[in-house]
Image (cartoon, rainbow, N blue to C red):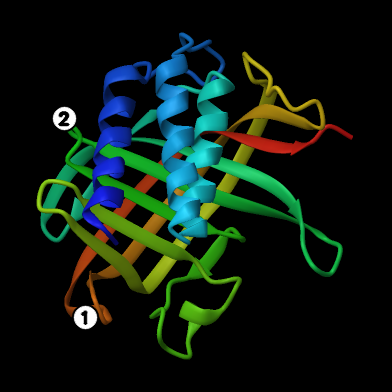
Amino acid sequence: MSGKSLGSFALVAAALIAGACQEGTPTAPAETDLELQAAVAAAGDAAAQSGDTDRALALREGASALRGGIRPSRIEVKIQNETHEYLAIVVGTLRRAAGGQRVLVRHLVAWSGRPAAALLQVTSKSEQALFGHPGGNDNGNDPDGARGLWKDLVNREIWVATAGSADLELAGTGGACPTQLPAPALRCVLASFDIRINGSFQLLGTGGPDGPPIEIHTNADGVHGVVIKPAN
């Protein structure tokens, strides 16, 4: 990934820290921050242009969650033997799979620091999924496998999950988001998720993930989020 792309991550994460509302209940309306929403959406567009579709999707849907008035939750993320506090949201999007059935795609986006120092992103199409090496024959190439990225924005490093598991369980849904989405065909409802991330992440180099892994874990219940689904 280019330095320009990595810089956009720093900008977005910093904007999230500066502009996101403080921790609260998911039903409490968040203050509208149009600049924050625009920054997240623009970073999603930049990711799409670079070909990073998973990242683009998560950022765009993170912007949708912010438009819906979601407040982030505080979670603890353990990296190797150090524990850090992150702010996090989970966005679930109900989509129709190739076979016609509906699948809830889950995106965890969590960030840390003032200014932002790191960003963790996990995407999964099921409650329980496995990480796999992107270049291997395991779940790294399985469309139903989990994808994980951790970005060290201070040292300009990107680490990708190559083993482990991601559990993103929809714990419950509530009422409508304080602000509904502008697209009339979509509906946003408040939700909470129980998350269990236990992954081995390797540094992403020019030839792919390589080198000794680091272990990243987070376990949290009731993480604030939204579910975006068709209105009908």
Secondary structure state at the residue bearing disc 2: loop
Observer-nearest of 156 and 62: 156
Q: Is 122 positioned to the left or the right of 231 in the image?
A: left
Q: Position of residue 226 (x, y in %)?
A: 59, 33
How dense is the environment of label 1, judged by Cα within 10 Å: few (below 14), some, or many (20 and up)? Answer: some
Name the amino acid type tagged 2: Pro
Q: Is residue 86 visible?
A: no
How many numbered callouts?
2
Query: Where residue 58 appears, x then y in whole percent?
Result: 50, 47
Position of 212 relative to 14 (above/below): below
Q: Is residue 68 above or below residue 220?
A: above
Pick the residue in front: 167 or 162: 162
The answer to whether residue 215 of the structure is visible from this angle is: yes
Please tell me which residue is depicted at 46% across the width and 8% down the height of the picture.
31
- Label 1, secondary structure: give it: strand
Residue 142 placed where, x, y %?
A: 56, 78
The crowding category of the residue bearing disc 2, from other C-alpha atoms within 10 Å (few below 14, some 14 to 19, many at least 20), is some
Give the number of the disc on residue 115: 2
**Mark 1: which amino acid?**
Asp
Q: Which residue is mark 1?
A: 210
Q: Identify the residue at image location x=22%, y=66%.
A: 215
Most distant residue in the right direction: 232
The answer for how far apart the CA atoms under marks 1 and 2 are is: 28 Å
Report x, y in % for residue 224: 49, 31
Horizontal side of residue 180 vs 154, given as left or right: right
Pointer 1 or 2: first along the chain: 2
Which residue is most to the bottom? 137
